Image (cartoon, rainbow, N blue to C red):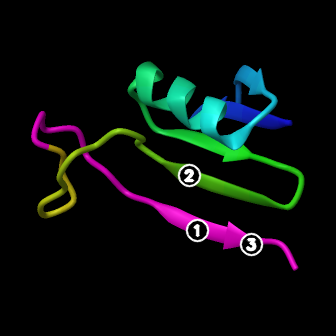
Amino acid sequence: MYKVISKSGLTLNVCPTLEESMKFAKQYGMFVTIKGKDFEVCGLFGADTIKDGKCPDGVEYSWMKRRNQ
């Protein structure tokens, strides 16, 4: 199971697969965290290009990869 969590910590959706959670995150269109059993990934999913930390629509973008070992 994969939780899609908003920047404020609200669980937006729970999906059975990573693919479904990423699809949901892309449709949501804002910065989210996808958290699974063994990892989590944060970002703005579906951004086509990033330049100087901003998406073409002017939204500021940042990302962080964390892995629990």
Residue 50: image x %, image y %? 19, 56
Whole-Å distance between the Cαs marked 2 and 1? 7 Å
Residue at (75, 36) in percent of width and height: 17
Amino acid type at image mark 2: Cys
Q: Which mark is residue 67?
A: 3
Look at the image and say whether residue 58 sits in the magenta stretch. yes
Image: 68 above or below 43:
below
Amino acid type at image mark 3: Arg
Look at the image and say whether residue 43 sits in the magenta stretch. no
Q: Secondary structure at mark 1?
A: strand
- Count neighbours of disc 1 (C-alpha within 10 A) and say few if under 14, some if 14 to 19, many if 20 or more: few
Q: Secondary structure at mark 2?
A: strand
Q: Residue furthest bottom?
A: 69
- Please say if the residues under marks 1 and 3 sit with CB atoms less than 8 Å apart: yes
Whole-Å distance between the Cαs marked 1 and 3? 7 Å
Q: Which residues are magenta?
A: 56-69
